[in-house]
Image: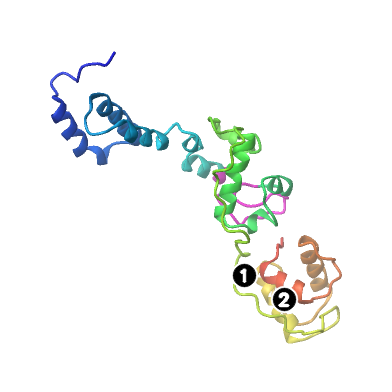
């Protein structure tokens, strides 16, 4: 049975008070006020009430963890570093391993994906498996909500396909200067020095010398191996590009 209006408040006065104070009210409070107004015929009809309840907290889309919860998880997992690669086979802000990353539709390496893609794929994983994949979730005492393990992923928006972040300090990749000639062990020239200098920026060389010696050979093979190329030691167009945008662990 409907209740009478609150004692001491006429219906018109209550309606005016709610309008004046709506800017300072939480979404939950707005819905509660809308329910009251709809029940007593003050300003809001049934259609407006239904529209409000669709976006009110407690619906499927809003049951996901808060931004602060995700931030706490990232700080624990990676110090909130989206480009991190410490060589432990886990990558990016959410420390995906490659098998898990690919299970939620990711390609390449997670730490090379944009922040938006990493965030979206972490949400997909949460919708599929809850907090289970993240050890830090247990350490932080995070609790699952209605969306955890629900399998509902159709409303999660992903960035445009192919949108990725570049390696730290990568900048624009210069064209391969060797033409049809690939640089190899024993050579010395300015282009090899440029390659070495770029790798120095990424933590390998103390300084580029231009001489392709044993240290350069080890580095080139590691760079090739980490990015899926045959580790043959030749600096061709693909290996040259990897110095700027490829995965590399010093």
Quarter occupied by residue 214 = bottom right
- SS at mark 2? helix
Q: Position of residue 90 (x, y in %)?
A: 69, 49
Above or below 12: residue 186: below
Could you classify mark 2 by the number of other residues whose Cα lies within 10 Å: few (under 14), some (14-19), or many (20 or more)? many
Quarter occupied by residue 11 = top left
Which residue is the extreme one toward the top?
Answer: 1
How far is the residue under mark 1 from the one under mark 2?
14 Å
Q: State the quadrant of the N terminus.
A: top left
Is residue 41 highlighted in magenta? no
Mark closest to the chain's N terminus, 1 or 2: 1
Is residue 90 highlighted in magenta? yes
At 28% from the left and 30% from the top, the residue drawn is 33
Residue 215 falls left or right of residue 201: right
Span shown in magenta = 74-95
At 47% from the left and 39% from the top, the residue drawn is 66
Residue with the mark numbered 2: 196
| Nearest to viewer (mark 1 / mark 2) | 1
Res. 73 in view: yes
Above or below 106: residue 212: below
Residue with the mark numbered 1: 170
Instruction: In this rendered view, identify the residue nearer to me: 58 or 133.
Output: 58
């Amino acid at each position: 049975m409907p209740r009478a209006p609150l004692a001491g408040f006429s219906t018109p006065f209550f309606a005016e008070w709610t309008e004046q104070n709506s800017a300072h009210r939480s979404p939950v409070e707005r819905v509660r006020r809308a329910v009251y107004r709809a029940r007593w015929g003050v300003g809001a009809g049934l259609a407006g009430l239904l529209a409000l309840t669709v976006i009110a907290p407690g619906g499927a889309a809003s049951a996901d963890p808060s931004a602060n919860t995700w931030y706490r998880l990232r700080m624990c997992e990676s110090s909130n570093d989206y480009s991190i690669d410490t060589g432990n086979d886990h990558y990016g802000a959410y420390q995906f391993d490659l098998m898990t990353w690919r299970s939620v539709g990711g390609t390449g390496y997670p730490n090379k994906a944009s922040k938006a893609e990493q965030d979206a794929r972490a949400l997909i994983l949460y919708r599929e498996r809850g907090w289970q994949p993240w050890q830090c979730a247990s350490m932080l005492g995070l609790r699952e909500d209605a969306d955890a393990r629900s399998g509902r992923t159709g409303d999660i928006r992903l960035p445009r396909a192919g949108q990725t972040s570049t390696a730290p300090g990568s900048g624009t990749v210069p064209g391969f200067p060797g033409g049809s000639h690939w640089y190899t062990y024993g050579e010395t020239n300015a282009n090899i020095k440029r390659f070495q200098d770029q790798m120095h920026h990424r933590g390998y060389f103390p300084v580029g010398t231009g001489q392709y010696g044993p240290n350069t050979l080890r580095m080139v093979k590691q760079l090739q191996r980490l990015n899926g190329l045959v580790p043959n030691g030749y600096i061709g167009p693909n290996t040259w590009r990897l110095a700027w945008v490829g995965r590399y662990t010093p």
